[in-house]
């Protein structure tokens, strides 16, 4: 997916976010606690489509669990591949140290 497609997809997701939240298995209070927001501010952000990328990452884990799991598996597999390449070139770090650094970097 190129950058323009990503932007339009993000816009589509933001426009459907209120429906996704309503149709989820969670009550609003769950999302308020997850994002540590007060009810009024949450609804204002939802109406104005002003969630930060960090907030969207938190929401995505609950709203799109299958897609998040796929993302997690793909990201970890890519990190393992990179780690193996570095090891072959004698540029590697300890695998577990590298994996933990990358998990933090990608929010996994």
Image (cartoon, grey):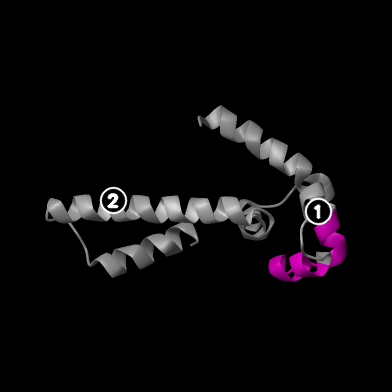
The CA span between labels 2 and 1 is 37 Å
Q: Earlier in the sequence, mark 2 or mark 1?
A: 1
The spot of residue 29 in percent (x, y) is 81, 69
The spot of residue 48 in percent (x, y) is 81, 46
- Disc 2 packing (10 Å; few <14; some 14–19; many ≥20): few
Q: Is residue 7 above or below residue 80?
A: above
The spot of residue 46 in percent (x, y) is 80, 51
Q: Nearer the viewer, residue 93 or 88?
A: 88
Q: Is residue 6 above or below residue 31?
A: above
Local secondary structure at mark 2 = helix
The total number of labels drawn is 2
Residue 55: image quadrant is bottom right
Q: Main secondary structure of the magenta part?
A: helix
Residue stretch in magenta? 29-43
Left or right of 55 on screen, residue 40 = right
**In the image, which disc is placed on residue 23?**
1
Asked if the stretch drawn in magenta spans residue 71, the answer is: no
- For mark 2, what is the residue? 81
- Disc 1 packing (10 Å; few <14; some 14–19; many ≥20): few
Q: Which residue is painted at 21% across and 63% down in the image?
A: 93
Asked if the stretch drawn in magenta spans residue 37, the answer is: yes
Pointer 2 with pointer 1, Cβ within 8 A: no
Residue 59: image quadrant is bottom right
């Amino acid at each position: 997916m190129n950058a323009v497609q990503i932007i339009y997809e993000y816009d589509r997701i933001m426009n459907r976010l209120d429906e996704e939240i309503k149709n989820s298995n969670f009550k609003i209070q769950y999302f308020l606690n997850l994002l540590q927001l007060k009810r009024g501010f949450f609804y204002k952000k939802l109406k104005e489509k002003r969630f930060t990328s960090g907030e969207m990452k938190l929401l995505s884990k609950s709203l799109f669990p299958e897609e998040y799991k796929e993302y997690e598996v793909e990201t970890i597999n890519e990190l393992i591949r990179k780690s193996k390449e570095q090891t072959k070139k004698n540029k590697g770090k300890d695998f577990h140290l590298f994996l933990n650094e990358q998990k933090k970097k990608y929010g996994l």
